Amino acid sequence: IKENLYEENPIKKLPTSPKFLDVPRPTPFSDLVTLWKYLCLNVQNAKGLEGLLYERNQLVFLFIFGGALKVSDLSELKMEDVLVDHESKSIRVLIRPRKRDPYTITMPSLVYEVFKNYVANLQKEKDKLANTNNILENIIENAPIIIFWKDRDGVYRGSNKLFLELMNLKDEKELLGKKDSDFNIVENENYINDDLYVMTNKKPMLNYTETISAKNNDIRILNTSKVPLIDEKGNVIGV
């Protein structure tokens, strides 16, 4: 400016860094109390996975506001990084920074009881899920009909023993990871087209007749139904 190269200071026209505009502000203590009471109330009233979610949120609350952990610390945290001393009823959390040596942070005494309850309830839900899966596996395996399922790419992900017998396979290992094109079947393209129709349109094909012909001329006639497999978000993940 003094040399008359610029009429005004060009630095003033540079946009302000977001770091200066978004200044961190402490959370009011009254808001923390309200949030903690809300979490405690829902832990008491909620059941199953919903209650487990609120217990997890209690731990996140205590780790951040009680132990001063950063969100980046929590994103890298594993169950084995929570070091529990049952004798003293205390907890330390192991932090593993990428550019420095690991270190531990001692948590408030309240964390011990919350974490203990969370771990116990987490194991209960895992046991329930395992039991449910066992029941479903038994139903599928012993159902008097042929059952199989594939992913969106047409890769086999499971079946029952009747389907393995139909395909002349000794065990499921010979099926998993393979496609219809990997087997000695004449109508492979028909099966693939039916799968694509069901997945693309999200509509089942029920009670229709199809044949399965091995290239040795052994022909089987089947009454078939195919339905799309849809996840919790409404996305088709297979057939």
Image (cartoon, rainbow, N blue to C red):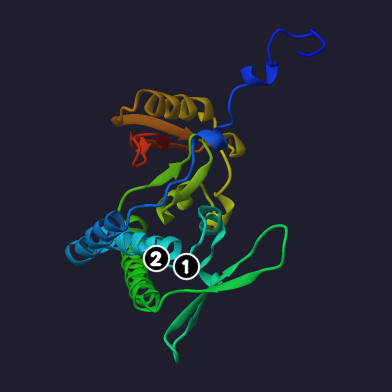
Q: In which quarter of the image is the N terminus?
A: top right
Q: Residue at 46%, 30% (x, y): give it.
A: 191
* SS at mark 2 in the image: helix
Q: Where's residue 90, x and y in %?
A: 45, 82
N-terminal label among 1 and 2? 2
Residue for badge 2: 62
Identity, as a three-letter code, of the amino acid under mark 2:
Leu
Q: Which residue is found at the position 33% from the left and 30% from the top?
A: 209
Residue annotated with mark 1: 67
Q: Are marks 1 and 2 in contact (CB under 8 Å)?
A: yes
- Residue lying at the far right in this picture: please name it: 3
Q: Nearer the viewer, residue 44 or 120?
A: 44
Quarter residue 142 falls in: bottom left
Which quadrant of the rendered structure holds the C terminus? top left
Tell me if 90 is positioned left or right of 201 in this view: right
Pick the front one: 4 or 178? 4
Crowdedness of circle 1 by 10 Å Cα count: few (<14), some, many (20+)? some
Q: Can residue 30 be seen in this view?
A: yes
**Amino acid at pointer 1:** Gly
Report the Cα–Cα distance between label 1 and label 2. 7 Å
Residue 135, position as x, y percentages in the image: 31, 63
| Label 2 packing within 10 angstroms: few (<14), some (14-19), many (20+) | some
* Residue positioned 48% across, 51% down in the render: 164
Taking the view exactly as shown, the residue that stands out farthest to the front is 2
In the image: residue 47, left or right of residue 203: left
Viewer-nearest residue: 1 or 27: 1
Report x, y in % for residue 30. 27, 57
Q: Measured from the top left, where is residue 161 in percent x and y? A: 43, 56
For residue 99, above or below residue 4: below
At a point 57% along the width and 56% down the height, the residue shown is 173
Q: Which residue lies furthest to the left in this view?
A: 45
